[in-house]
Image (spheres, grey):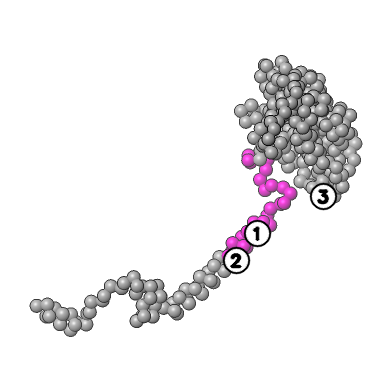
């Protein structure tokens, strides 16, 4: 019976094909294939993918080149209201030690000069950017940076640090740290095209009313809690009106000098931690405690005690 079926199969021209083994898949000597393909087939598919990826790479490079042509290296593509950058400038302070970026504590000991050296060094580096006055101009009371947005040949105003030196907040006085009257820099984040908007006469906040000057950004620092308010002591603002608005709007230029103000803590108590809240004031600056919008916090701790000697090795 079995022979009859085999004969029938052979007569019909149908022979059972033996399944290909994995070894034969890797290399089949009879068919001359490697991994199921002949040499000609491998050559054809290799040439196809080389051409395919060349065209794909050229397409990607072309798209990238066109996209980059639409970008301005000086101005973000999207900025202002409705973007992640926003229209409300943040507030920053110095000295902020990069060695400990998560800390907002300014702590030093009046009897240990090494304790305030990092802060002095940080401020020296911060102010060094103002030493280069190339491609800047002297600006009088009626001048501003207004033309920077429309005139490519216009030069930014030069920021004068002399006011800080006169208030004993300069490098020669070690920024007040040596005398226990630390001076802290307060600045606004750089927002392209941003400029302060003046308050109406009746809308000036009470806390800055006596110092407010049209065109400037007033700064006000006070204790963050009732305890801190009580122990903060006398605060002096340099200049008194705050950050000078003549230096706005901000435009991306290598020679642009950012305007700043300094806050001098004349009677900060000894051996007490005081949390300071500084706010910037203009009609177009909003304040939000939860997101710290328009404000900045830092802690001051001025010690006055004999330093503890390091244990002998």
SS assignment at label 3: loop
Q: Position of residue 170 (x, y in %)?
A: 85, 32
Q: Is residue 293 left or right of residue 3?
A: right
Q: Which residue is mark 3?
A: 152
Residue at the far bottom in the pictured view: 11
Q: Single out the mark in the foreground, 2 or 3.
A: 2
SS assignment at label 2: helix
Residue depicted at x 72% and y 51%: 73
Q: CA distance from mark 1 to mark 3?
A: 25 Å
Which is nearer the N-term, disc 2 or disc 3?
2
Q: Single out the mark in the foreground, 1 or 2.
A: 2
Q: Is residue 277 left or right of residue 213?
A: left
Q: Which residue is mark 2?
A: 58
Name the image quarter holding the C terminus.
top right
Count neighbours of disc 1 (C-alpha within 10 A) and say few if under 14, some if 14 to 19, many if 20 or more: few
Which is nearer the N-term, disc 1 or disc 2?
2
Residue depicted at x 82% and y 41%: 128
Which is nearer the N-term, disc 1 or disc 3?
1
- Mark 2–mark 3 contact, CB under 8 Å? no
Q: Which residue is mark 1?
A: 66
């Amino acid at each position: 019976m079995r022979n009859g079926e085999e004969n029938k199969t052979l007569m019909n021209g149908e022979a059972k094909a033996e399944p290909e083994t994995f070894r034969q898949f890797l290399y089949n000597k009879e068919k001359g294939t490697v991994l199921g393909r002949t040499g000609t087939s491998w050559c054809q598919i290799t040439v196809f993918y080389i051409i395919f990826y060349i065209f794909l790479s050229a397409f990607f490079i072309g798209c990238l080149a066109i996209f980059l042509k639409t970008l301005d290296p000086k101005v973000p593509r999207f900025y202002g209201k409705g973007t992640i950058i926003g229209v409300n400038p943040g507030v920053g302070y110095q000295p902020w030690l990069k060695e400990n970026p998560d800390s907002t504590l300014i702590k030093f000991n009046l009897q240990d000069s090494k304790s305030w050296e990092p802060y002095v060094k940080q401020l020296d580096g911060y102010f060094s950017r103002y030493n280069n006055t190339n491609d800047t101009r002297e600006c009088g009371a009626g001048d501003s940076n207004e033309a920077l947005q429309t005139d490519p040949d216009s030069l930014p105003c030069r920021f004068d640090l002399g006011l800080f030196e006169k208030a004993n907040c300069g490098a020669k006085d070690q920024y007040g740290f040596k005398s226990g009257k630390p001076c802290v820099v307060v600045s606004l984040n750089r927002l392209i095209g941003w400029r302060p908007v003046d308050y109406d006469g009746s809308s000036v906040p009470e806390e800055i009313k006596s110092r407010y000057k049209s065109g400037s950004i007033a700064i006000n620092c006070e204790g963050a809690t009732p305890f801190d308010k009580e122990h903060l002591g006398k605060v002096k603002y340099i200049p008194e009106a705050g950050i000078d608005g003549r230096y706005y709007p901000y435009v991306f230029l290598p020679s642009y000098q950012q305007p700043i103000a300094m806050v001098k803590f004349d009677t900060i108590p000894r051996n007490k931690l005081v949390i300071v809240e500084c706010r910037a004031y203009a009609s177009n600056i909003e304040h939000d405690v939860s997101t710290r919008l328009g404000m900045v916090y830092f802690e001051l701790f001025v010690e006055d005690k004999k330093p503890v000697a390091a244990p002998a090795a």
